[in-house]
Amino acid sequence: MVEFIRSTPAHLVENSTTVIFIVTSRPTVTLLPNRSARNTPLRAQVFNHINRYLCEHHEVGRYTTMFFSILDRDGHLSFINADHPSPLILRHGQVTELVTEGSLPVGLVPEASFKASTAKLLPGDTLVLFSDGVTEAMNPDEQLFGEARLQEALVGQHEVPLEQLQKNIVECIERFTSGASQADDITLLLVRYNAAAQTAGSAS
């Protein structure tokens, strides 16, 4: 079972087996066939193709960061990151980064090569995806909210319901910004993984 909550304009698609989510600087989402994440290879070559296309067609006039992932009912997470802020994992009250390696955005360097990575979520883990508008939220003194403050807002909150957790984070950002006008959207997507329910007859 997977719980999720999002703030506009983030999007997420869920079916009985997988959760598929894409977070970009221009959020979008695509539904993939109903298959296990382990059996649905993320096509890194698609990212490579998109990257070359954007680099070759200058009339498009922009590049984009992107995080694309598939989470299956067993907690297997497959993902490709293209210079998007690393999602955070809230596990037993502690916060870690999912992505530790640097990458390039799509549409900037023609020779860039993207590859898929994997991770395993444990029951009760919360995956926190966010736009750079969260960490770059600015207060009247032009100080940035930053990832450190976001992590501080998450520490110890592993048992808090997702709706309340989202509210807590947004309120923390609002207190910091003190009404200052923001140049970018503030987007959050929270996904909590719970162990898949046992099927009838599976218990010993």
Image: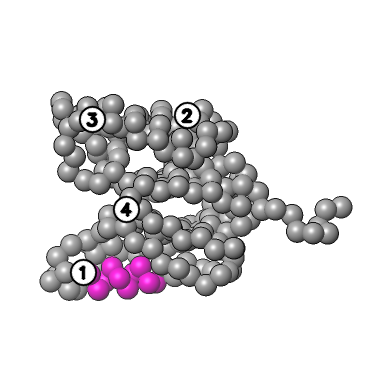
| Proximity of marks 1 and 3: CB atoms separated by less than 8 Å | no
Q: What SS does tag 3 mark?
A: helix
Residue linked to disc 1: 55
Tell me which amino acid carries mark 2.
Val
Magenta residues, start to end = 45-54
For the residues bearing labels 4 and 3, Cβ distance under 8 angstroms: no
How far across and down, in percent of the image, does residue 63 sit?
A: 22, 61
Q: What secondary structure predominates along the stretch shown in magenta?
A: helix
Q: Is residue 53 magenta?
A: yes
Which circle marks residue 177 in the picture?
3
Task: Name the amino acid type tagged 1.
Answer: Cys
Tell me how far mark 1 sits from mark 3, CA to CA. Answer: 36 Å
Instruction: State the SS at label 1.
Output: helix
Q: Which residue is mark 4?
A: 9
Which sits earlier in the primary sequence, circle 1 or circle 2?
Answer: 1
Whether residue 98 appears in this view of the structure is: no
Q: Nearer the viewer, residue 58 or 126?
A: 126
